[in-house]
Image (cartoon, rainbow, N blue to C red):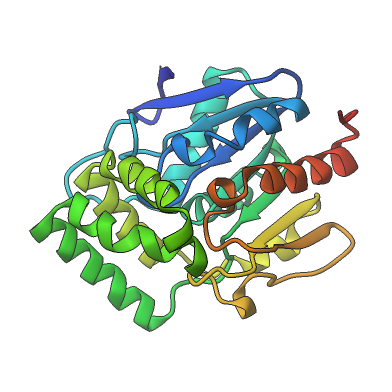
Amino acid sequence: MNKKQLSTGIAVAYEEAGAGEPLVLLHGFCGSRGYWEKTLPHLAEFGRVIAPDLRGHGNSDAAGAEDRYAMEELADDVAALMDELKLTKISLFGHSLGGYAALAFAEKYPERLSTLGLVHSTAFPDTEQAKENRLKAVEAIRSQGVASFVDGLVPKLFAPNHRESRPELVAKAKEIGYGTSAEGAMGCALGMRARPDRVSVLERLNLPILLLAGQSDEVVPPEKRFPVSGDNVTAITLEGVGHMGMMEDPRATAARIGEFLKRNRGIDGV
């Protein structure tokens, strides 16, 4: 594990592997860089892979009790980490919450992107019901703690058949989730609730875009997985996975991302 103090005022932990053109992997809500643990070695064939913990998650600092963590602030953390690592441009892939942060980054720092990928994520904002559920999540975390909330959240992230057949994956994701600070969980829940519709960001983005969805994802419904199309957009459905493709099928997840990078960055693949 590496850790850098950023200009945004927090210290961010990250994992790194490989060499060459940089690609950054952002994890989902109540996750950490550990979500990418099995995928990262495969992706290291395609460049220098950097997987940070978002603020308030894993080994990264929280930003303050019950503050809202705006997606733009998470994007600023990524830009500040790039500055610390002296990276001019990156390929950025965001899972779920990480996808929302990646979209905010694409809106604020488009000149610093080579490619953009949403992994089990969406450019659409929360529905009114989802916004209400975010407030319920904050209250549950405040009253019962992170561990209880994670126990209820994590099983829903996996394909229905994997909840029973792959208990070790569910247990691993729970273990990762327990490392989330209450401030980070509540702050990101409120930040996700407030995020705007960013479909127009994808529509305006003049660079290669990967939209990677899980066939059995019960978090992002089919109608919200592929909000845009075009010559610069690659839309792929991963068979047999839910919302956690990087854990449920790390080889396939890495292969699809790697193929996208080779096609769009001119990397000589293995």
List x then y, in percent, for residue 96: 51, 56
7 horizontally vs 185: left or right: right
List x then y, in percent, for residue 2: 44, 17
Residue displayed at 64% across by 63% down: 240
Regarding residue 159, the answer to whether it shows in the image is no
Q: Is residue 211 above or below residue 256?
A: below
Between 268 and 111, which is closer to the camera in this rendering? 268
232 horizontally vs 94: left or right: right
Regarding residue 54, the answer to whether it shows in the image is yes
Residue displayed at 68% across by 20% down: 18
Between 194 and 209, which is closer to the camera in this rendering? 209
List x then y, in percent, for residue 207: 80, 49
**Quadrant the C terminus occupies:** top right
91 horizontally vs 94: left or right: right
Between 147 and 264, which is closer to the camera in this rendering? 147
List x then y, in percent, for residue 145: 14, 53
**Quadrant the N terminus occupies:** top left
- On the image, which quarter does residue 77 sit in? top left
Q: Is residue 215 above or below residue 182?
A: below
